[in-house]
Image (cartoon, rainbow, N blue to C red):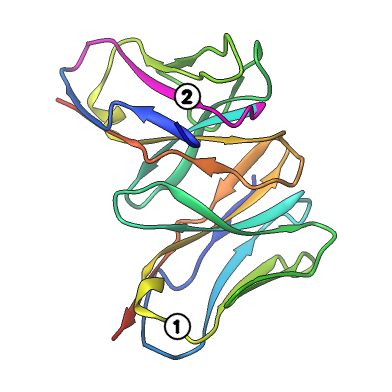
Amino acid sequence: KQEVTQIPAALSVPEGENLVLNCSFTDSAIYNLQWFRQDPGKGLTSLLLIQSSQREQTSGRLNASLDKSSGRSTLYIAASQPGDSATYLCATNRDDKIIFGKGTRLHILP
Amino acid sequence: IAGITQAPTSQILAAGRRMTLRCTQDMRHNAMYWYRQDLGLGLRLIHYSNTAGTTGKGEVPDGYSVSRANTDDFPLTLASAVPSQTSVYFCASTIEDRDNQPQHFGDGTRLSIL
């Protein structure tokens, strides 16, 4: 059974710093991996999707990498802003099932 | 309507009552999903549908049923609600399952069973 783990559960960093969020998974036979953002009281918004054949994806200040052999993905956020404060979740897609990590709650300090 | 609409936004329900959570999307997506999100447990898949007329069980299907009569609607029914079904429920969709397209989520239904 696929297990997706995100460490740390919570993170606080000063505004302007670059930061990395981590995601690990136990089964590398995935179709893709997604990173989502969730604001309080809201649904999830897809940030980046990395296909199994890809190593990374970029969107603006966000860069996500995927290393299937080691079962790891990272989300890099450059020049963090207070508006980046949210919970970030990763999820793997395998066998018609999407398995989510429990998320990292990010707080950017002004 | 733009994207996924869930209704109601929140509901308080007595145990034993029947409840249907509504989900409608206007993106003509074939695949739709229902998740529940609980503190400490994260998001877990309840049921899914890869196309109209078909449904499948997810990780936690017991106590829930779904139907997919058309492309746009994917209601989730609790036949006899129990307190352990207190949760936030999210509906999601994607163009095709396994098609490497991102999932789109509704804003959720916060359900409390007393």
Magenta residues? B15-30
The residue labelled by disc 2 is B24
Element type at marker 1?
loop
The image shows residue B80, relative to residue B107, as above or below, that is: above
The residue labelled by disc 1 is A80
| Quarter residue A15 falls in | bottom left
Residue B14 coordinates in the image, percent (x, y):
15, 17
Label 2 is placed on what type of residue?
A: Thr
Residue shown at 64%/49% (left/top)? Answer: A2
Residues behind callouts 2 and 1 on a single chain: no
**Badge 2: chain ID:** B
The image shows residue B9, relative to residue A38, as above or below, that is: above
Label 1 is placed on what type of residue?
A: Ser
Outermost residue toward the front in this view? B1
Q: Quadrant of the C terminus of chain A?
A: bottom left
Q: CA distance from mark 2 to mark 1?
A: 35 Å
**Badge 1: chain ID:** A
Residue A108 left/right relative to B66: left
